[in-house]
Amino acid sequence: MTTLTGRRVAITGGAQGIGRAIAEALIRSGATVALGDIQVTVVEQTAAELGSGTTGHRLDVTDPASFASFLDKAAANLGGLDVLVNNAGIMPIGPFLDESPDLTRRTVEIDLMGVLTGTRLAGRRFTDSGTGHIVNIASVLGTLASPNAATYCATKHAVVGFSEALRQEWRDTGVRISAICPGFVRTELIAGMSAPGPLERFLVVNPEDVADAVVQEIAKGVSRTVFVPKAVGVVSRGSTAAPTALVDMLFRLSGGNKVTEDLDKEKRAAYQQRLEGRDDEA
Ligand code: NAD
């Protein structure tokens, strides 16, 4: 089993889903964790359930002051900070022209600007001390594109590009940066979405699979982009060299488009409401 004893990790969007699974895996490997989330009650409850000194804090990743305060509290509680996992995210699904400008802006602010802000704040701390690791949770939609997910694809492509640029920029600083690109993960974020049978087996994973990959990346201490599962990366990266018409045809033949086009709106209603109603607590 991978050992991360003594590592101190801050995780955004840690109340539920992938963030919570990452926290659980890190704690099992010996790390200590601080969770930040806009759902204050849920994040405090999650921290209490995880135990092992885990703390839960209010965090809005779109607000740099809130982010700075979260990192300060995390460092104070943990006795320092070695890793930031930028995990908080939302995913609106539907035709771009039907998406409200407010939801577009909010998605960019959370999924992209939140990552940039966190990376800047933690990056300053880490480059000052010459050590540290930033792990950005991107997506396979950060290298592939899918209909009905245009804004999300835009942000996740940006997160991959951003992480890969800093990988080079920070080459000699001792600070590491990783982009993790999961396929689809069984959390509330994909409520009402499904992949056709064979694609399901290829593309859809559990939050624990992503969490294991994060633990491995931190343990390896290298800067790179990884896919979960790995095969998704081969297809995704490989397709960039193929002619566009062929890529689109294969995407449709595999049923890839159905994941974001065939929505069960009833099953997605609660998530959709959470997106539009801003689920943050006062
Ligand atoms: P989730 O909805 O279960 O969890 C996301 C968490 O982020 C929630 O706890 C939410 O309250 C929090 N959050 C939202 N806005 C925030 C804000 N402004 N400030 C702080 N916290 C905020 O979703 P998840 O599936 O666990 O997603 C986690 C990350 O993984 C996201 O970045 C998502 O894009 C990415 N991802 C998910 C999938 C998937 O299929 N589920 C696939 C690839 C990548």
Image (tube, grey):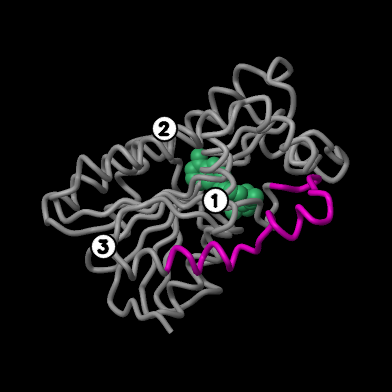
**To which residue does mark 2 refer?**
113
* Residue in the image at 44% along x and 32% along y: 158
Question: Counting other residues with Cα less than 10 Å from the Cα at mark 1, is it few (<14), some (14-19), or many (20 or more)?
Answer: few
| In the foreground, 246 or 99 | 246
* Residue in the image at 12% along x and 56% along y: 130
The three-letter amino acid code for the residue at tag 3 is Asp
Could you tell me if the residues under marks 2 and 3 are in contact, i.e. CB atoms within 8 Å? no
Which residues fall within the magenta stretch?
190-215
Give the vertical position of 186 relative to 48 (above or below).
above
Residue 241: percent from the left, percent from the top?
A: 52, 34
Residue 275: percent from the left, percent from the top?
A: 66, 36
The three-letter amino acid code for the residue at tag 1 is Val
Whether residue 113 is visible to the viewer of this picture, yes or no, is yes
Left or right of 128: which side holds 277?
right
* Residue in the image at 86% along x and 41% along y: 264
**To which residue does mark 1 refer?**
234
Left or right of 170: which side holds 13?
right
Residue 199 colored in magenta in the image: yes
State the separation of the CA atoms marked 1 and 2: 28 Å
| In the foreground, 215 or 92 | 215
Mark nearer the N terminus (3 vs 1): 3
Give the vertical position of 96 relative to 112 (above or below).
above
* Residue in the image at 34% along x and 37% along y: 117
State the separation of the CA atoms marked 2 and 3: 22 Å
Label disc, if present, on residue 171 of the rendered structure: none
Residue 212 colored in magenta in the image: yes
Image-quadrant location for residue 100: top right
Whether residue 281 is visible to the viewer of this picture, yes or no, is no
Instruction: Classify mark 1: helix, strand or loop.
Output: helix
